[in-house]
Image (cartoon, grey):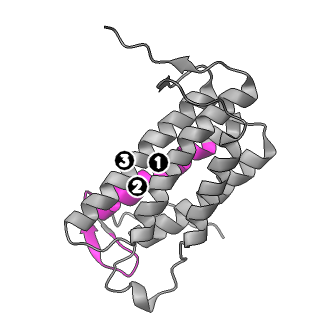
Amino acid sequence: MSFKIYTKTGDTGKTSLIGGTKVHKNHIRIETYGTVDELNSYIGLVSDYLTNVHSKQMLKEIQDRLFTIGSSLACDPDKEPLMKIPDLKEADVVLLENEMDAMNEVLPTMKFFVLPGGHQAISTAHIARCVCRRAERLCVNIQQHDLFVEPLVIKYLNRLSDYLFVLSRYIAHLLEVPEIPWKPRV
């Protein structure tokens, strides 16, 4: 028996948070976890361009964490304590930091700003980085509206955007594609 993907329950412009609370589809929580979903899709695309097994495995791990973050953001915070929602852990942030440190060991020191480009994988990693920064800004916006967002989510997204920048440089290194320096007009 197959199930239908459409439910028609959102036809009036509302949807439900995990826990059943109805909100408008332009609610800041919906916008935020939708952006995390967009980020997850771009990370999948970056992975599709790569052949490096370790980087692909790391991106799969990150995609799993983004589903965890999406679950957290999609949950009604008043009802979350009563539910089993996957947790993000400080070790997830540390993993990103360790991965950046390992990639930076083989990368040349940055002496200029880098323009996105040179290969589809590099450009897509930069797009993912930008979407990640947007997701981070949206989480901060949730906080500023006195709505709950787990502080570790913001920390993870902040570190993930750094990771994606370093990954874009690492991909250039693996593909032997020269980085494109930004040369400002003077």
- Rounded to the nearest whole Å, what is the CA distance between mark 2 and mark 1? 6 Å
SS for dot 1: helix
Q: Position of residue 19 (x, y in %)?
A: 38, 82
Nearer to the camera, 86 or 92: 92
Which callout, 3 or 1, points to the residue nearer the camera? 3
Circle 2 crowding by C-alpha within 10 Å: few under 14, some 14–19, many from 20: some
The residue indicated by pointer 3 is: 134
Q: Residue 24 falls in which quadrant of the image?
A: bottom left
Give left or right: position of 157 versus 12: right
The residue type indicated by label 2 comes to: Gly
- Rounded to the nearest whole Å, what is the CA distance between mark 2 and mark 3? 11 Å
**Residue 34 — which label?**
2
Q: Are marks 2 and 1 in contact (CB under 8 Å)?
A: yes
Is residue 35 magenta-colored? yes
Nearer to the camera, 114 or 32: 114
Q: Are marks 2 and 3 in contact (CB under 8 Å)?
A: no
Determine the residue positioned at 31% across, 85% down: 78
Q: Which residues are magenta?
A: 16-44
Determine the residue positioned at 78% across, 37% down: 51
Task: Work out whether residue 66 can be spotted.
Answer: yes
Q: Earlier in the sequence, mark 2 or mark 3?
A: 2
Seen as rendered, the residue at the extreme top is 186
Q: Earlier in the sequence, mark 3 or mark 1?
A: 1
Nearer to the camera, 20 or 83: 83
The residue type indicated by label 3 comes to: Arg
Is residue 56 magenta-colored? no
Q: Quadrant of the N terminus?
A: bottom right
The residue type indicated by label 1 comes to: Glu
Would you place residue 63 above or below residue 56 in this image? below
Q: Residue 27 falls in which quadrant of the image?
A: bottom left
The residue indicated by pointer 1 is: 38
